Amino acid sequence: MVLKRKNFNESPLQVVAVEDASGVVGKGENYLSEIERVRATVLLGSGKTKKISLIIKNQHETEQMKKLSLELGVFFREITMYRDILPKMEDLLDEIKEEEDLLWGRCYDYRLYDRLVFEDLNEAGFRMADRKKQLGLQAALLVVKNLAKFHALSKILLDRGEIPLDVFGKHIWAREPEISKRMVTENAERLLKVMKTWGDEWQEASERFEKAIPDLGKKFAEELTVKPDEFAVLCHGDCWTNNMLFKGEDLENPTAVKLLDLQISFLSTPAWDLHYFFKTSVRLEVRKKHTDQILQEYVNSWKSLTSRLPYGAFVPDVDYVKENMRKKAVFALEYCTNLISIITGDTRDNADLEDVMKALKEAEDKGEKIPVELWDLSKMMTPNTINIIKDIITDSIEFGIM
């Protein structure tokens, strides 16, 4: 109780004044919101005021990006996470007197439904890893350890009926299944053109991929809603390098991690987050050599946490996780048509997203495809990007999904 009172007394309750603001992330580093760092005077629980640095996350104000944000409900979803879900997870951790720090940063304030105000984790020594270089083994182990805790806590709340299914029951793109199918198909067609430049040894894979394209969008759209008989957790939804901050002088051996950006959280199997994180954020050579070790860390963390909580249901083991990822390999195949290039590639010359969305709307109105030059994924691809995509394609053939 003394510690809680101390935390309350030192916690910001209200922003009194904002003195200056600056951008936080550059072009190609964030997509569904605008983020700025501000120096502000805040009112503490003790009644005193203090000057601190804050991160403010705002909804886009440009026409098409604002429209997209509202249609997808990303700020509504994230505010619900910080207002309703994460405090319940924190209560569970308090029950077992969890000594490790929270898995997420503090949200100090929000405005329905277009703004959130967060603690500036840079002030506590956290920083972002390089998305192009991706993560090494120790960072990957740390992330899956905390991701398992997030999944396990969500499973307890889900079993208690404390996660609203009307909010989190489906992925944001499940609201627009036809648009999702079209996006997947068009991106796959662009990737196919790139694959055909890889030489004769990739001819058979290209032919297989081409045959898979007509059904790929449908298969992916079907997986945006978890099936009733599947083992579901609340997934982070967008678990990649830029949505986590690490602490430590050497990011090859970080001491702590914070998960950020919960705008896309939704119910799915653990495979969604694991595929997403593995394919976008863990170096290929690390993933190929240490997958079993990383998955074992995930399972051990889940078991350790749930053994101390009132939870008597299924606890996944490594065999389950591997099989789940095999069954959901379509996730990874879809990621390589779009996300892998954006996340690991060179996005400095990308078109402005507002221009892309305008062009997409105009193309839809005319029944046409978005001009390739406006969103050319091949121009973003680095040699590492291509190697990741080749690895995913190879796995997809092995798993029989193309």
Image (cartoon, helix red, strand yellow):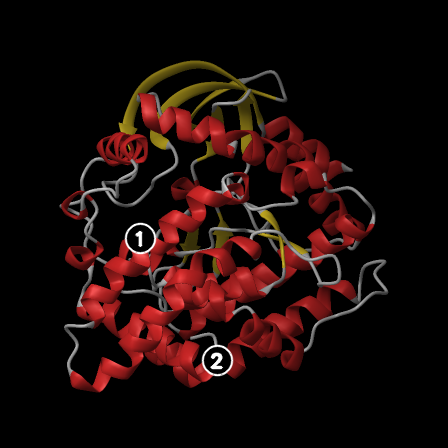
Q: Is residue 283 left or right of residue 52?
A: left
Residue occupying the far front of the picture: 367
Amino acid identity at mark 2: Gly
Give the residue drawn at x 63%, y 61%.
269
Give the mark, 2 or 1, whose residue is nearer the N terminus.
1
x%, y% of residue 76?
56, 29
Locate the N terminus by quadrant.
top right
Q: Is residue 152 left or right of residue 206?
A: right
Q: Is residue 85 left or right of residue 179?
A: right
Locate the C terminus by quadrant.
bottom left
> Disc 2 on helix, strand or loop?
loop
For residue 54, say whether it is visible: no
Give the residue drawn at x 35%, y 52%.
128
Marker disc for residue 96: none
For residue 349, say whether it is visible: yes
Q: Which residue is mark 2?
A: 400
Marker disc for residue 186: 1
Q: Is residue 234 above or below residue 76?
A: below
Give the residue drawn at x 64%, y 59%.
149
Cβ atoms at labels 2 and 1 below 8 Å apart: no
x%, y% of residue 397?
41, 80
Q: Is residue 270 above or below residue 317?
A: above
x%, y% of residue 155?
73, 55
Q: Is residue 328 above or below residue 173?
A: below
x%, y% of residue 121?
43, 42
